[in-house]
Amino acid sequence: MTASHIDLFTIDDNGQFQLASAGQVIEAALAILDEKVMRNGLISAPADASAFFSLRLGSLEHEVFAAIFLDAQNRVIEYIELFRGTLTQTSVYPREVVKTSLRLNAAAVIFAHNHPSGVPEPSRADENLTKVLKDALALVDVRVLDHVVVAGGASVSFAQRGLL
């Protein structure tokens, strides 16, 4: 599916129109977003990252810790869901984040995770994790540009809050 071709309805065997399901519409929206991000290859503002992550992670019923890896010109290299957790927590391993950054030859990274509780407010543990990751990645010259916490359609950017 491409952004230029999205079927919001189909015609069944009886010639009747069938509207796309909510899941199909969301899948189409994700395809458009993926195509835009990968084609343009650029996340130019915290709002871009927040919108991307909100669509990707906002409706999940379990925590996921993800990252967008960027080159030296802040062009997108790859989006990866790094760790999956439970309803209330995810284990994140800084060593694995550093290894992935080096494997992709990333110069920068934007982190995100979701709060299935519906409250995007970062916890003290979220702040501590971000500091640990930022310090670990600084040792290999990878910059942490942001950490976005999403819940439903709402999000909080560490960069916009001055928490980086």
Image (cartoon, rainbow, N blue to C red):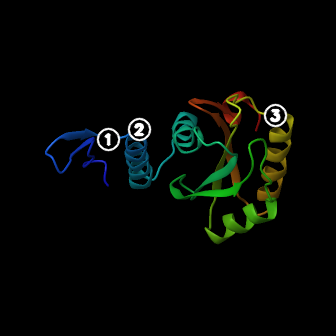
As rendered, which of 154 and 11 lies closer to the eye? 11
Camera-side residue of 113 and 102: 113
Quadrant showing the C terminus: top right
Asked whether disc 1 touches disc 3, contact meaning CB atoms under 8 Å apart, the reply is no
Mark 2 or mark 3, earlier in chain: 2
The amino acid type found where label 2 is placed reads Ala
Q: Amino acid at mark 1?
A: Ala
Lower position in the chain sequence, tag 1 or tag 3 = 1
Q: Up-down: is 58 above or below 107?
A: above
- Measured as percent of width and height from the top left, residue 79 is found at 56, 56
CA–CA distance in space, label 1 to label 3: 38 Å
Report whether 150 appears left or right of 96. left
Q: Give the x, y percent position of residue 114.
A: 67, 40
Tag 1 residue: 20
Q: Which residue is mark 2?
A: 22
**Front label number (2 vs 3):** 2
Amino acid type shown at disc 3: Ser
Q: Tag 2's secondary structure?
A: helix
Give x and y (percent) for residue 35.
Answer: 39, 52
Q: Is residue 19 left or right of residue 30?
A: left
Q: Residue at x 57, y 42 (%)?
A: 53
Residue holding disc 3: 123
Which residue lies at the image location 17% right of the left edge and 41% below the top edge? 16
Mark 1 or 3, closer to the camera: 1
Classify 23 as above or below 79. Answer: above
Q: Residues within 10 Å of mark 2 (few under 14, many from 20)?
A: few
* Residue 91 falls left or right of residue 56: right
In the depicted view, which residue is nearer to us: 119 or 159?
119
Q: Give residue 56's quadrant in the image.
A: top right
Q: Residues within 10 Å of mark 3 (few under 14, many from 20)?
A: few
Q: Quadrant of residue 23?
A: top left
**Picture quarter with the N terminus:** bottom left
